[in-house]
Every structure is written in C-alpha cells, then in structure tokens.
Amino acid sequence: MKNIEEQLSRLGKELDKLEAPPQLELRLRKALKEKEKPKPKLGLIAAILMALIFFSYNLDVIAYYGKTILGYEDVIEGPINKLIEDNQGQKIEKSYIFKNGLVLKLDGIMLDENRLIAFYTLDNGNNNLEDYYLSSLEMKGILRYYGESGQGKYNDSFTRIKWVHDFEPPKFFERNLTFNFTLNGPDNYLEKGSITFKLDRSKAMATKVRQKINQSIKINDATVKFHWITASPTQTIIKGTIGTPPEYLNNLLKNQYFRYNIQFDLLADGEKINHQCGGLRTSLR
C-alpha cells in the first residue's frame, strides 16, 4: 500500500509540472468567445429556422464532399458534369480482376431520389479493349435494381473505357449493395463479376421538388394525365398515364389495340429543358 501511495504522490507532482501549450489556451479562449454570441430575438426565430432548413439541403451538399470522382469530365455533359465539378458523390474505389487480366474499377456513385449513377472504368492494360463489353448490369441489395442507360468513352489507345451508367434508385432501407456485371469478349468469352460496397446515405443528394400535378388533357380518343414531377440534382422526372379504364374497355370492345407514344416539353422559367430519356409500361389500369 505504501508503494502505491508513493507512486501516486510522484505522479501527482509530475502532473502539476505539466503546462498546456500557449496555442491551446488561445484556441480555447477563441472557442468560448464564439459561444458567447447574443441570442436572437424571438421575432427572428422563424426566419432563422427557415434559413437553416433551406441551407441544410443545399449548401451542405455542395460544401461537404471533398474531391471524389475523377476523370469523368469528358464522358458526360450537362447537369451530371456540373455535379462532378462541384465534387458531389460517394467515392468507392473498389476493383474486380477478371481471369483474363481485365480490371473493372467502381470509382464512385451519385445517389438521389431519381436514380443511382455508377462511375466505373474497364481497363485492359496495354491491349485493345474494343472486342469486350459488359452486360447484365445490376445493383443488388435486398432487392435488385437494374441498369437503365449509360454512356462511355475510350482513351486514345482504346485500352481503357470510362462509363457513366444509370440504375433504379435503391429503396430507403438498402445499406449494402453489390454491383453485378458480366464481361463478354471474343471466342465466346463470358465471365461474371461483382463488387460489394456500403451505401453512405449521408452523401445522397436531397430532392429539390416533389409535387403533384394531377392534370389531364384529352388528345383524340385518349386521356393523358400527368401525376407527379420530381426534381433532383441529377434529373427531373415526370410520371403520368395514357388512357383510362373506360377507354381501355372501349378499345377492347372495338378490338382496337394502340401502341402509344407521347412527346412533350418541359419549360423552366420559360426555357426548354433538354430531354434525356423516357419509358412506357402497359397494364390493365
């Protein structure tokens, strides 16, 4: 017991001799001074809360991320390229090496309510890559999310290609995803591969607008109804239906079957927004 007391006494004397660095004291004083800001008046609270809510969905998205997805500035144009310039997205940097030596690297992703965008590179070292291509692209979590569209660009020697590919947006409960793909090549070469990564939803971009439209127009014998518009940083999507159940039944009675096609323009503040893609599904409704 006496030895323990002596050790504690000696340790206490050594601690008494310790001094905080001068710069630490200055930092603590500065932090305390900043905390002593006067409280806002009650009349300003509502306005301040509104500003906080607004900027939490906008400025944070721009300021939070460091440099993430590199080398895709020449692959895609428009809003996605602007987001790349603003350093948006989640860095992945995981690779899969095929048996023939080709390497697929998932550099990063972008995620919002409308879609998940994958940025990946297929590299064949010093060999030509033109005879190879990827198929059966999907993101697999609890559910499956299929590839919808994409575009890529070769380097000058055709030994590497960078791709930007769209996928259906994962459901809110997804946390871990697996990027599945199949490499196709000459002489019936076929090999499946996958890359698993954790989805970081703190790096997902917030939806700007989600609003009901609920307006219908009659064109010839069909009713076109616009249901929703969803605007996110990467894309604006308008969803609706062509035809109503009574119109469908009437067509059946007349033995008429139509393959519908619709084209429309979206204007924002009087300026036409470039159309990217569209899709159509049919059902009894």
Image: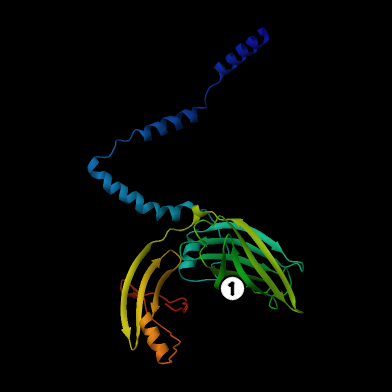
Q: Residue at x 68, y 9 (%)?
A: 3
Q: Position of residue 89 (x, y in %)?
A: 52, 59
Nearer-the-camera pick, 34 or 211: 211
Does residue 159 appear in the picture of this structure? Answer: no
Please give left or right for residue 285 compared with residue 47 in the image: right
Check disc 1 and give the amino acid type. Answer: Gly
Under circle 1, the secondary element is: strand
Which residue lies at the image location 37% right of the left edge and 87% below the top edge?
A: 250
Task: Please tell me which residue is depicted at 27% across the width and 44% down the height of the picture.
Answer: 45
Quarter of the image for residue 39 reads: top left
**Dot 1 corresponds to which residue?**
152
Toward the front, the furthest residue is: 253
Compare residues 11 and 255 and report the one nearer the observer. 255
Q: Can you say whether 109 is above or below 21 in the image?
A: below
Which is nearer the eye, 262 or 3? 262
The picture places residue 214, in percent across and down from the top left corner, at: 32, 72
In the picture, the quarter occupied by the N terminus is top right
Instruction: Residue 42: tell me if it is visible.
Output: yes
